[in-house]
Image: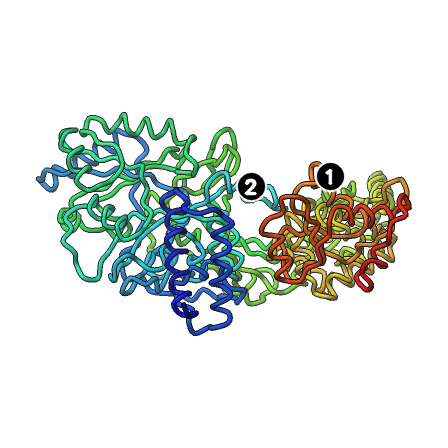
Amino acid sequence: MDYIERSKELSRLLTEYQKAYYVQGRPLVSDLEYDRLFDELLLLESQHPDIRKPDSPTQRVGSDLTSDFPEVQHTIPVLSLDKAYSDSEILSWITKTIKNTGENLSFVLEEKLDGFSIVLYYEKGLLTRAVTRGNGFVGNDVTANVKTIYSVPLRLNESVDIAVRGEVFLKKAEFEKINATLTEPYANPRNLAAGTIRRNKSSETAQVPLSIYVYEGFWTEPENLTDHIQILSRLKDLGFPVDPHISYFCRTKDEAELRLGQAGLEGEAGSFDDIPAAIADRTGTRASLPYEIDGLVVKVNELATREDLGYTEHHPRWAIAYKFEAPQAQTQVLDIDVQVGRTGRVTPMARIRETQLSGSTIRNITLHNQDYVNELELAIGDTVSISKRGDVIPAVENVIEKNEQGNTTWQMPEKCPVCGSVLVRRGAHHFCPNYDCPAQAKGRLAFFCGKGQMDIEGLGARTVEILYDKGFVKTISGLYEFDFNNLRFVEGFGGTEGKKIEGIKLALQQSLNTPFRNVLVSIGIPEFGKKAVDLVCDAGFDSMDKLIELADKNDIEALSAIKGIGPKTAEIIIDGLKSDTVRKLIEDLRKAGLHMEDEKEDGPVLEQIFQGQSWCVTGSFENFNPRTKAMDEIKRRGGTEVSGVSRKTTCLLAGSGAGSKLDKAREFGVRIVTEDEFMKMIGSSDGTSAGQSASEDQPGLF
């Protein structure tokens, strides 16, 4: 069989295996066999690029090319849904809809997944575009990222032109697993899914196991379909994953069971009288689902009636959303302005009519970013419903009534309101690019002095603002250069308040003893929070000099090889460490006397024989149970951990039962170390063994 035919056969097999695993939940082959076939196809396509097809299974791995997410006009209506907060409202809506149409209707109840809305466009069965909801009329093209989602078919079972609406989501278990590795955890799976879809590099999106359920289909050439359950059945036949947890209601349960069975769909059937019980059951059992839902959606089943009912400017008249959590208050948006944070991120803030909510007085609510505002279609003067998500953070849930002034959806200003710099957009957020913007400078100072960082008593946000506005302290290092006795002439600091000055001076002096890890966090490099700093220091990069050397080499791989530090985080940290302003700050703080190296543990210092090397450990061992103990020995001697084998891996420590990683090490020419050899290496490094040293065993390697 030649390479062309072999690539076709591999594509067919892998597509079949992907569908069985990710859509049908029934794996057909072992992970090892799947990886073997996938690597073979990847190799063939790299050797013969002309055979790579747009729907090749290898397209799931993504690319390292940066995407700018161009805007795309939607060709189908992508609107929001009207909302209800009780089963009585739902029944009233059903009764009103039947009365207004005068027809014998049926209704479908679907889960409202708490994810990220997406529209998939197919031409002749091939996925050509994946577009975000945007403002309902124009969205962003995120095709490369969506292609990495295994449950999204790249080619359909039939050559049809179709647009499909769906919801991208992240399962709870995967969310918890990923969130545990992040220095700044996401609030919920929806936010992580949305952030992942908007990653600039699709190779990073591919690392997050997103899923999708589709719920609407729009054919370019009309098909002989008369109702919604037929659409769902047809989408399922084409290869799309559809939510199995639907309910279907007719005037009688028998009729509903018959029609649901004819469509070949899973789900529950009932009469209209069963709807309140179905809503109550879904509300009570939603916590047991493997994914988050924030409500239910009720739809008219008959397509002809949908056409007759039509749409308002904002939502279809043939569907309504039942929200689990009712808003606790209504208020009016008086104004919207923006705040500039220490990293330059610009966040819109709604100034609302003062409202009591769960024992708190609410005056301001964050609107996160322009996409969030667009989704709400929020304008100044609108009457809105608000809630406290998680009983903590106030949020605008939806617009109840549009303003009478004719104000349109609020838009982010072009320039920073503080320094006048033209704002730039990165992903979903806008940023002020001026590092010296006063708002950013004050934010950095307050962060540096705050609890959890340097914890400098007496230098709160208000005091820092006074120091900056008076021209006394403009930079972080300026805190250690300024003569605080000059504050005696500033209102609030002189006279008997001189004690406050002495307290600040003492706190600054004491801050020179702050551990290196806190100093590193306090510098404020993006993505370099406490958790990431601990991971990096524990991996052996435990001094400022080592980190600067890492940045000078642009060694993103060494950093991303640390368990818990992904490639995107590693890239951001490296870029931060390469920044001229950060370098100057580091040197100024070094001169001021702050710690620039992690404190060493008591006990003998081991010879750093693995310094600068990356090790992977696989299999089981007699002397290291669990095998993480072997990796601990490597780290104690300067080595770093990698989870997989690549061409840049220095060594693979292979125990009994080593599998695919051993095969890859042989393929890439990575040195394979046995347990006996490893015992000699580490024994030699701490003087407890007379075995050969590593350098004698492999000249030039150590």
Instruction: Report x, y in % for residue 562.
Output: 67, 51
Q: Where is residue 125 in the image (x, y as percent from the top left)?
A: 29, 62
- Is residue 564 among the parts visible in the rendering? yes
Image position, residue 174 (x, y; %): 51, 42
Spatial separation of the CA atoms under disc 2 and disc 1:
25 Å
What is the number of callouts on the image?
2
The circle on residue 177 is 2
Dot 1 falls on a residue whose secondary structure is: loop
Q: Is residue 365 toward the left or the right of residue 108 in the image? A: right
Q: Position of residue 323 (x, y in %)?
A: 35, 36
Give the residue displayed 22% in from the left and 58% down from the top: 219
Label 1 Cα neighbours within 10 Å, binned few <14 / some 14-19 / many ≥20: some
The kind of secondary structure element at disc 2 is helix
Going 87% across and 58% down the picture, which residue do you hit?
591
Residue under label 1? 624
Specify the farthest residue to the left: 102
Position of the N terminus by quadrant: bottom left
**First-in-chain label (2 vs 1):** 2
